[in-house]
Amino acid sequence: RPVALSRPASPLADPSLVPFLAKSPTLRAGLAQVERDDLDVVWGQAGRGTYLVPGEKIVIDENAIGQGSRIARSLSHEVGHHLFTEPSDLTSRQSYVNGRLRGEAAATLSNVQVQREIVAAGGPDIGVSGTGGRPQQYGAIAVEFQAGRINRSQALRQIAEVFKTEAPSVGPHATYEL
């Protein structure tokens, strides 16, 4: 008979996350900033998605309990949101949406960076959040950015262009497109 996993107090207390944190300086630094900014990292209801409540908390779907790879992937994305500081452009609906997509792109770039650090340090591939061939597209754009062939703003714009066709984890029956 399978033994039920006990629920760690928070995603950061989940023992399955420890080996991933040890292999990613970017994730450790991002989480240190989250702590300095006094954000909580909490479990959310199963199946309700993973998300940032700005200035308050990062919520990780409790279905990830015991899955360090999934927790690391989710945290790398949500920490990327928290660290994205471009102000919202409220001049038009399209400008606002484009800004939100740049935020998603920054979170995705954070996810790719953490994934690469973990793999380079001999850890397993945590993957990049996304569906279909999009994660590979995000990775290819990140390679161009890291090689200096495009700048950060160009990388964010290119990732945002791909990301707008994704379905949000908190509303999986829609996309980010207007």
Image (cartoon, rainbow, N blue to C red):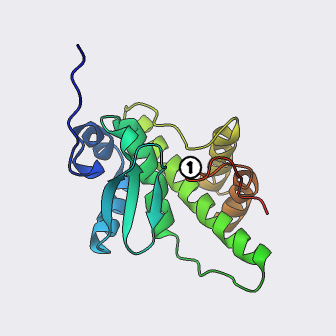
Query: In screen coordinates, is 155 left or right of 26?
Result: right
- Front residue of this view, candidates 56 and 132: 56
Q: Is residue 162 left or right of residue 110?
A: right
Estimate the x, y position of residue 132 in percent, counting from the top left. 69, 35
The quarter in which the C terminus is drawn is bottom right
Residue under the point 65% across and 39% down: 131
Q: Quadrant of the N terminus?
A: top left
- For the point 22% across and 39% down, the residue is 15
Q: Farthest residue to the bottom: give it.
A: 91
Q: Pinpoint residue 138: horizontal percent, then vertical percent.
A: 65, 47
Kind of residue at disc 1: Ser
Q: Residue 124 in the image: x percent, y percent?
A: 41, 30
Residue at the top extreme, as displayed: 1
The residue carrying mark 1 is 169
Question: Please, is residue 24 above or below residue 104 in the view?
Answer: above
Which quadrant would residue 126 be assigned to in this image?
Answer: top left
- Residue 89: give x, y in percent of width and height: 68, 82
Q: Is residue 11 above or below residue 79?
A: above
Q: Residues within 10 Å of mark 1 (few under 14, many from 20)?
A: some
168 relative to 79 in the view: left or right: right
The residue tagged with tag 1: helix, strand or loop? loop
Front residue (pair 131, 138):
131
Q: What residue appears at the point 52 percent right and 70 percent down from the top-left corner?
A: 84
For this view, does 80 lie left or right of residue 62? right
Residue that appears at 56% across and 54% down: 109
Residue 150 visible in the snapshot = no
Query: How many numbered dots are placed on residues in this image?
Result: 1
Whether residue 130 is visible: yes
Q: Against 151, is 116 above or below?
A: above
